[in-house]
Each structure stands twice: as structure tokens, then as C-alpha cells.
Amino acid sequence: MAGDKAQTILLLFFLQFPLLQAAKILTVCFIGGSHYLLMDEISQILHNNGHQVRMFLQYGNSMLPGRPLQQRPYSVSTYSLDKKYLQENEELFVESQKDYLVGRNTLQNFVIFLRELSYQCNITLQQSDILNFLKEEKYDLAVIEGFNPCSFLVMEKLGLPFIAFFPGMMMNGGRIGIPGPLSYVPLFGSELTDRMDFFGRLKNTMMYLGSYMIDRIMDAPFQEVIDQHFPAGSRPTITDLQRRAELWIYNIDFSTEFPRPLLPNVQFIGGLLAKPAKPVTQDLEDLIAESGESGFIVVTLGSMISSLPLVEFLKEMNDGFAKIPQRVIWRYNKTSWPKELSIAQNVRLMDWVSQNDLLGHPKVRLLVTHGGMNSLMEAVYHGVPVVGIPLFGDQYENVVRIKAKNMGTFIPPDQMKAENLANALQEIMENSSYKTSAMKQRVVLRSRPFPPDKQLVGWVEHIIQSGGGGHLRPYSYQQPWYQQYLLDVILFISACVGVTIYLIVKVIRLLIYLMSSNRKQKQN
């Protein structure tokens, strides 16, 4: 009898929490480089966990220079940009790199980049055959690359519930309603830490006041796309679309990020590409063996930057590496190396390197990186100190955090001199405190209760099972702006205080008048 009762309770328990059947999931990626690497990894993780996955991919920006093409286990719907446009876009990117390498990382450059994305988005929204096919497939959920606003416009066209995966740090926290106290949460672009002095807090506040105008400037190229592809009366804003995400996932972790308040619909799942190291190729192992006790350093400046367009910058880096005893394994397109520049004897150029595997090698001493989040997560995972050379985007903010955690330092590109680089490399490798800090952050990252792939799958399946993320989103998403900032309450209190002060003044004036009248009557 007791056994029957136990079986009944167990059955009721499982009926309340039914097992999730294989879901149909669409992943969306319209940017190449590290953005594509992450979305490819997400697609593979979901596929390996039994879900039916298809990626909507913009071909042309997804290829990685020097990286061998790999067979994907999931389905792909793709389209290609015009070859002439791709060539022109590549030339524009090279010109932008020249600006970045001399320290000109301006808002204007970023707006130009967004205009290119908006032009590509126009082409994307014209792919009616693919869009109709995807709409007819009736996916349960989409996981989109959340940096490119075009992903949100495609979701609006398809009418799908979606999770937004952001490939880097929290650049858009304020836009999606995440609390950000200005006293200890630095704004994107401020290059501040969470330990701000008075002038740091002043800078943070002034940047916050100007952020609304900057958001409008950055949204303008895509607002034109919205006007063209959505009928009047039902045209969404970028902020509206971002707030429709069932869940926001950021490719960051508190091993590098500063502590800050979060909402239930925001999850930090950083380090999807950081994994236990595999053995390197035999030729690399032989090269590393030649380094002896000095070891080697890894140099990579991003998955989309296979060469540097400024010979002067390249010469300073090469001369800096020549001043250290370590071997240098540098990911660089060998055919693009300037013929007039002799490669330092301790430097090996390679078109592609398995960065994660090299960082897990026992003889690695340091990573020289542009400061991309994927590279930093791999460095943290393997406990490797860092010297950053930030170029654009969130890279400056990322390396500020690495320096604040005492995991390394950074050199602004306009200060790149051989002596500066050599000194920074020697300081990080000879001062054991940096390695100690790197190993401490490694423990923080690796000792999370669940690995990032399990967190990803768990949250995706939770959103599908619960029918969306409405229970995670704050009510503030539905409030008008004046209610969110309590302006109506402030106005009411101000009015009450004003009326009270007015009445008090009137009463005092009346009392004074009556008292003066009584004196005059007594005198008369």
C-alpha cells in the first residue's frame, strides 16, 4: 500500500515536470569572426543535446581568415552578399584598422560600421524565400546574436520568441532596464573600474546624461531600415525589440566583470569556447621544446584581423618581441608580412593557431591579445596572464577589467613602441603576482556550479518549457518612462510641498498682518 502511494506521488511529480522533447530551434548570425564562432558553438551545443537546429547565416562575413573549414552537424540556411560589396567592405575595414592602430577609436568610426550593418540588413530583409521558408518551419524558439540590431528585425518579421546572446560585455544594460548605479557600475566607454573616485563618478554621470543622444545616433541607420521594411503605425524601435527578448545571455563572467545588480532575465554565461586543452601539432611541440625553461607566448589580435595594415606598428611589435628570450607564436597571415621587415628569430608566424590549446600548454607564459572577450575567457580558463593591445569596440573596457583584476596590463595602440612592449612583457612574466591572480580567476571561472554549456541548454529548455520568459521580465518594461523614473511621484510630492509652503507663508503673512493691526489699534 505504501509502495503504491509512493509510486503515485512519483508519477504526479513527473507529470508536473514533463521531459522536454526535441525542440526546433533557429540560430541567427549576420556577423563573422568571434561572433560567428560563438553562434556556431551554441548551435552545436543545442544540436548535441538532441534539438533540431538550423542556423540563418549571412555568408561572406562568417569565414575566418586562415581557419580550415569545418563540417557543421546542424542545418544552415545561408545567402551571400555581393562580391563587389564584400571587397569594398573589406577595404573599408582595412582603413578603419589604420585609425584604430593610431588610437582613433571614435564614435564616428562605430557609426560607419553600423551603417554597413544596416546596408547588409536591407539585403537580409529582402531574402523573402528564406524568410518565408523559416516562417513556415514554425520554430519553438530562436537564439540570436544580440550585437547586430538586424537580428531583432528578422525576429519581428518571423514572429518568433527569441533569446538574445550578446558576444561581449554589457554594452546595452541601460536600454534593457538593468539597474546600473553610477557610483560603482562604470558605463561602457568610460574605461573606469567599479572603484571610482569623485572625478570618476563625475565622468560616469556625465556620460550617462549623454548616453541617450548617443543611442539615438547609433539607432539612426537601423531606423531607416525599419521605416523601409515595416508599415507605418507598427514600426518598432530598437529598444522595443531588445526588450522583447525572452532572456538575455552575455558572454561574460564575474571572474572578469565587476559585480553589479542583474535582473532574472539576464544571465552571465561566459567561456563557451574555453575548454580543456588538446595536444598541439608535432611541429608546434618541437618549436615549444626549443624554448627551454623560458617558455613561449601566444600573440593573436582577433579572428577577423589576420594582418596589420601599418608597417610602423608591425615593426614596433616585432622589435619588442626580439628583446625577450621567449618563443613567440604569432597568428599572422604570412603572405601579408612586409618584405622589407625581417621577422625576429624567436618569432613564428602562423596563418591559424588553436589558441585554446596553446593557452593550456604547460610552457605558455603569456597571451598578447586585442582584448576580445573570447580570448580573455580562454586566458582566464587556463590561468594565463595577459598583455592587451585594444583596438576598437569593447576591447578597451575588457582590458581595463583585466588590469583591475591584476591579471595583466595593456598598451594603447598609439603608445606601441618596442621598448614599451618588451617592458610590459617582462614585467608580467617576471612578477609572479600576475600569474597568481590569473590562477585565482581561473578557480573562480572553473568552480561555477554548472559549466557554461549546461547553463546554456538549461536556460533554453527552461524558456521553451515555461512558454517564454515573461515571468523573468520586470514590469518596468510596460511602464511609461515617467513612471519608471518616478517623475509623477516627484511632481506630486513637489506640488504638495509647494502648496504646503505657500499656505504656511500665507498664514505667517496673515498673522504678521493681524499682529501689526492690533499694535496700531492699541497705539491709537
Image (spheres, grey):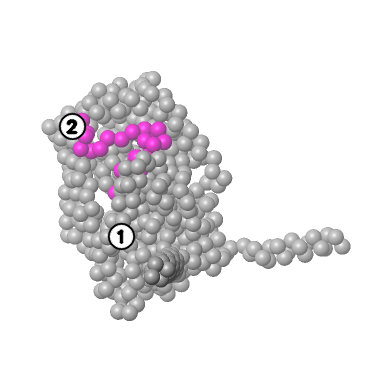
Element under disc 1? helix
Q: Is residue 73 left or right of residue 234?
A: right
**Mark 1 crowd level (few <14, some 14–19, many ≥20, 10 Å Cα):** few
Q: Report the disc number at residue 149.
A: none
**Residue 259 in picture, x, y percent from top left:** 46, 45
The answer to whether mark 2 and mark 1 are in CB contact below 8 A is no
Which residue appears farthest toward the front when viewing the image? 524
69 in relation to 126, above or below: above
Element under disc 2? helix
In 3D space, how far apart are the residues under numbered discs 2 and 1 (Cα atoms)?
41 Å
**Residue 173 in picture, x, y percent from top left:** 40, 55
**Boundaries of the magenta span:** 393-417
Quarter the C terminus occupies: bottom left
Q: Amino acid at mark 1?
A: Tyr
Q: Give the residue pinned by disc 2.
A: 315
Q: Report the disc number at residue 212.
A: 1
**What residue do we see at 24% from left, 28% from top?**
420
183 in relation to 524, above or below: above
**Residue 382 in picture, x, y percent from top left:** 45, 35
The residue lying toward the viewer, choosing from 73 and 449, is 449
The residue lying toward the viewer, choosing from 348 and 35, is 35
Q: Amino acid at mark 2?
A: Lys
Which residue appears farthest toward the left when viewing the image? 340
Q: How many marks?
A: 2
The residue lying toward the viewer, choosing from 270 and 125, is 270
